[in-house]
Image (cartoon, grey):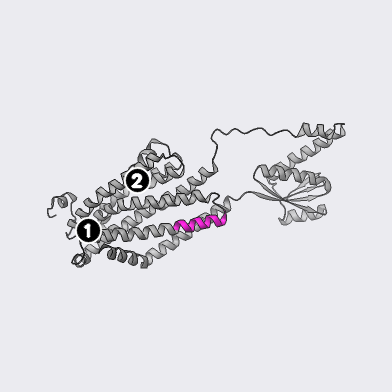
């Protein structure tokens, strides 16, 4: 019987206008964030106009030096200084080298490009001065072609780790929203059926445990489907605009988010169902949900901090606790800071806590469902009327 209830919950929620609008807005916001991030993170590129044969060696040195700094320089050879000035004035070129004698810019000179030109020009003039002083080309090359100073990074940045942290950060945000939103749907759905007395009709044909199980599975399946949709759209958009360089890691992180959503949702959905079953009015629901809200918000902030310090004592402990592991453990795994036994322990603890919680939640839900007014959990467990 519970699969019928689950199908009803899934279909009704999908048809809900609010769900459709919120999903569309979420996808638009996600796409916009990915596109804007890609636009701001694009590598710097300059257009350089060159006039005269003497300027060509300088331009080649500028391009070579810029490539080492991850800066793009497109060189455009022009016939004379007048055309170079017009190109700079029209914005077609950021700067122009005229006969290796001067640099032409429109207003404020682009510091990176001008610095590269000045360095290349200095090398070119030094080379000519050494040649004119009688040194051979081999001697000049040995004097000028010195290796750059090595760079020692005290905290080297791993590009893969940085990207994994970014994806994990987005995953924590989405998981937080999904767990809270769909948990609230479970609670508000229980209150709505209870206040409208629809539940009395349903219980004539459906057992309370089947009703709870169907509601949790139906809403959970919808949440999982929406989360998968958000992940696929975000991944495809990031790939299209070139934000993600390591798609395999991003796909693995998406898979982690989905797995821990399932673990976290069933744990929290049982608690949200209890929160909804012990009240009759929607106005009272916020009060019974407050402890759950505090747990999710606290876990969210720990999950955010774990993106920068995944090996901290707080992050390690939170990744093992069932109420916070869905928002912390995926980040630690994505960043490579979780050991295999911590992952196994987190899954076992979460699954065990959920397995122990579901019968208790079902018992409270079944006994409180037909009671009016505010119901105390202790009274329900003792089997006394409120």
> Which residue is depicted at the point 37% across and 65% down?
14
Left or right of 314 in this view: 363 = left
Left or right of 177 in this view: 267 = left
180 and 258: which one is in front?
A: 258
Instruction: Provide the residue span drawn in magenta.
Output: 230-242
- Residue 99: x, y in percent? 82, 47
Looking at the rendered structure, the secondary structure element under dot 1 is: helix
Near mark 2 (Cα within 10 A), the count class, few <14, some 14-19 or many ≥20, is many
205 and 60: which one is in front?
A: 205
Q: Quadrant of residue 229?
A: bottom left
Where does label 2 land, which residue?
A: 347
- Residue placed farthest to the left in the image? 384
Where does label 1 land, which residue?
A: 209
- Residue 281: x, y in percent? 23, 60
Res 235 label: none
Instruction: Indicate which disc, 2 or 1, sits on the residue closer to the N terminus.
Output: 1
């Amino acid at each position: 019987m519970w699969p019928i209830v689950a199908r009803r919950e899934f279909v009704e929620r999908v048809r809900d206008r609010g769900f459709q609008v919120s999903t569309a807005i979420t996808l638009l916001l996600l796409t916009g964030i990915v596109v804007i991030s890609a636009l701001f993170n694009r590598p710097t590129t300059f257009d350089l106009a060159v006039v005269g044969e003497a300027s060509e060696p300088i331009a080649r040195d500028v391009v070579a030096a810029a490539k080492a700094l991850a800066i793009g320089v497109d060189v455009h050879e022009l016939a004379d200084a007048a055309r170079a000035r017009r190109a700079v004035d029209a914005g077609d070129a950021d700067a122009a080298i005229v006969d290796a004698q001067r640099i032409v810019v429109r207003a404020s000179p682009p510091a990176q490009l001008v610095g590269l030109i000045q360095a290349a020009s200095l090398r070119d003039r030094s080379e000519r001065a050494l040649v004119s002083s009688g040194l051979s080309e081999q001697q000049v090359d040995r004097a000028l072609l010195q290796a750059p100073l090595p760079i020692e990074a005290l905290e080297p940045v791993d590009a893969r780790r940085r990207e994994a942290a970014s994806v994990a950060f987005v995953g924590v945000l989405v998981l937080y929203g999904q767990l809270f939103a769909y948990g609230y749907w479970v609670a508000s759905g229980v209150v709505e059926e209870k206040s409208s007395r629809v539940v009395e009709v349903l219980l004539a044909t459906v057992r309370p445990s089947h009703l709870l199980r169907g509601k949790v599975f139906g809403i959970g399946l919808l949440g999982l489907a929406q989360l998968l949709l958000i992940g696929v759209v975000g991944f495809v958009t990031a790939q299209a605009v070139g934000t993600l360089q390591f798609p395999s890691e991003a796909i693995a992180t998406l898979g982690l988010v989905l797995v821990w959503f399932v673990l976290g949702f069933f744990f929290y959905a049982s608690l949200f169902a209890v929160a909804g079953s012990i009240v009759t009015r929607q106005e009272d629901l916020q009060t019974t949900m407050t402890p759950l809200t505090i747990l999710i918000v606290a876990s969210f902030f720990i999950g955010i901090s774990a993106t920068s310090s995944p090996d901290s004592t707080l992050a390690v402990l939170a990744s093992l606790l069932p109420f916070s592991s869905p928002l912390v453990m995926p980040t630690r795994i994505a960043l490579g800071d979780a050991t295999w036994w911590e992952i196994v322990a987190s899954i076992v603890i979460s699954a065990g806590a959920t397995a122990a919680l579901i019968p208790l939640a079902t018992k409270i839900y079944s006994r409180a469902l037909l009671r009016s007014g505010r119901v105390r959990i202790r009274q329900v467990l003792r089997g006394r009327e409120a």
